[in-house]
Image: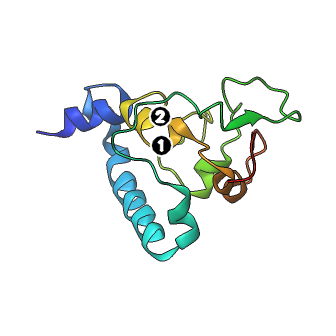
Amino acid sequence: MFAPVISRIYFRDYKFWRYTKFYIPMVKNFWRIVYRNITDKKYREMFSVPFISPPMLGPERTVVQVTENWTTGTQDCNTCQRCCTIIDCPLLDKNSGRCKSYDSFFWRYFNCGRYPLNQKQIAYYGCPKWEVIAPNE
């Protein structure tokens, strides 16, 4: 009964049968992230997104900027995949290098759409694209 709604939230598509292969890996990844949040204080401190935060299609540009070394455009990460592979995200399509959930409700409201929030996230993922504007956080 909830499968079409969940499919819409994660994949922008009500045809849930197309995405059934992702459901079990997504549940496993969810619990892996919960475990990390409970056991790893550094990981937990990086992700403080209030539930009332508006959706975002990128980081807050008053906090971070693209590094001078990044030459492949500012709109996407040019299939860098570092943050996705470190958390072993099941929504990363390994063939195309693209996120299956890109620009969905899930992507915009949670960490993916607003990454990076701070220097801790940039350091944790070793992100080559972003740098903090005011590093005195």
Q: Amino acid at mark 1?
A: Leu
Q: Amino acid at mark 2?
A: Lys
Q: Quadrant of residue 2?
A: top left
The front one of 41 and 32 is 41
In the orientation shown, which residue stands out farthest toward the front?
Answer: 136
Residue 25 in the figure: left or right of residue 77: left
**Residue denoted by label 2:** 100
Q: How many marks?
A: 2
- x, y (%) of residue 132? 73, 43
**Residue denoted by label 1:** 91
Is 137 located above or below residue 31 in the figure? above
- Graded by Cα atoms within 10 Å as few (under 14), some (14 to 19) or many (20 or more), the crowding at tag 2 reads some
Q: Quadrant of the N terminus?
A: top left
- x, y (%) of residue 130? 74, 40
Is the Cβ of the residue at disc 1 closer than 8 Å to that at disc 2? Answer: yes
Classify mark 2: helix, strand or loop. Answer: loop
Residue 78 in the figure: left or right of residue 23: right
Is 99 located above or below residue 124 in the figure? above
Is 117 located above or below residue 77 in the figure? below
- Tell me, yes or no, if residue 93 can be seen here: no
- Graded by Cα atoms within 10 Å as few (under 14), some (14 to 19) or many (20 or more), the crowding at tag 1 reads some
What residue do we see at 21% from left, 32% from top?
A: 4
Q: Quadrant of the C terminus?
A: bottom right
Classify mark 1: helix, strand or loop. Answer: loop
Q: Quadrant of residue 68?
A: top right
